[in-house]
Image (spheres, helix red, strand yellow):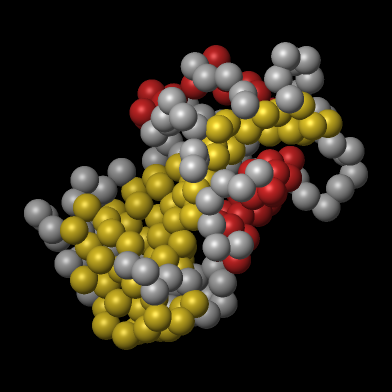
């Protein structure tokens, strides 16, 4: 099954890096003002969704879902739901982290939503890659300068980190004490992270 790429409207400065993460077979959903990234990314939409309150409908010869301005879902969340409805299991979200903290936080929680549907999700921006870590180990190689683990779900027990400057074994990270910030992979190693109960947001920083 092809991957679904969701393009939101947050700023993208490093188009070359983002373009390298895209594949020829990706199904790309542009969400409202995410359309401003078409030229920079050098790709066209497979689907357009939005209420077009922040970007004019380009009226391309592409399937377009026009949304009402007053709704529960943001345009980006609606795009993700549409991708789920169309049967995709793997999601890459770009243009999701920016100056609007409310939108950024809402977009980060899309990863939790995807997990609840049994889907894979990853967010990338100009500086980092983000995904949720659960019992299935996540790997971080030493090409990343730092990595952080942040509790966004309320429960994260049995946290284990191997091959890192600050290892952990069967630990707990709570929302009220976020001590998993700015860890480092040991040189020449690949860090391995797992969570027995709950989930953590893994942020890998270049």
User: In the rendered image, which quarter is residue 159 located in?
Assistant: bottom left
Residue at 67% x, 29% y is 47
Q: Residue 95, position in %: x, y?
A: 56, 36
Q: Is residue 144 left or right of residue 188?
A: right
Residue at 39% x, 33% y is 21
Work out which residue is located at the far left of the displayed protein and give it: 188
Q: Is residue 144 left or right of residue 31?
A: left
Q: Residue 134, position in %: x, y?
A: 43, 70
Q: Is residue 157 above or below residue 194?
A: below
Residue at 55% x, 40% y is 4
Q: Which of these two is toward me, 13 or 77?
A: 77
Q: Residue 114, position in %: x, y?
A: 58, 58
User: In the rendered image, which quarter is residue 10 located in?
Assistant: top right
Q: Which of these two is toward me, 134 or 61?
A: 61
Residue at 49% x, 38% y is 2
Q: Which of these two is toward me, 138 or 163?
A: 138
Q: Residue 64, position in %: x, y?
A: 76, 27
How many tags in the picture? 0
Q: Is residue 122 left or right of residue 100?
A: left
Q: Is residue 108 above or below residue 143?
A: below
Q: Where, quadrant-wise, is the C terminus in this rendering?
A: top left
Q: Is residue 184 above or below residue 15?
A: below
Asked whether residue 165 is in view, the answer is: no
Asked whether residue 20 is in view, the answer is: yes
User: In the rendered image, which quarter is residue 66 located in?
Assistant: top right
């Amino acid at each position: 099954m092809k991957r679904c790429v969701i393009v939101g409207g947050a700023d993208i400065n490093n188009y070359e890096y983002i373009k390298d993460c895209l594949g020829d077979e990706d199904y790309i959903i542009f969400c409202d003002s995410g359309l401003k990234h078409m030229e920079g990314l050098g790709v066209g939409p497979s689907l357009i969704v939005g209420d077009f309150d922040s970007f004019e409908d380009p009226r391309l010869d592409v399937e377009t879902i026009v949304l009402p301005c007053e709704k529960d879902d943001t345009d980006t969340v609606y795009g993700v739901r549409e991708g789920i409805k169309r049967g995709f299991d793997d999601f890459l979200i770009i243009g999701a982290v920016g100056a609007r903290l409310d939108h950024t936080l809402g977009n980060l929680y899309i990863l939790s939503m995807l997990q609840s549907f049994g889907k894979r999700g990853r967010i990338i921006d100009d500086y980092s890659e983000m995904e949720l870590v659960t019992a299935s180990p996540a790997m971080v190689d030493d090409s990343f300068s730092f990595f952080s683990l942040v509790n966004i779900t309320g429960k994260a027990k049995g946290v284990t980190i191997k091959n890192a400057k600050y290892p952990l074994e069967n630990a707990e990270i709570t929302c009220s004490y976020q001590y998993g910030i700015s860890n480092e992979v040991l040189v020449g190693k690949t860090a391995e992270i797992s969570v027995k109960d709950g989930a953590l947001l893994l942020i890998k920083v270049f």
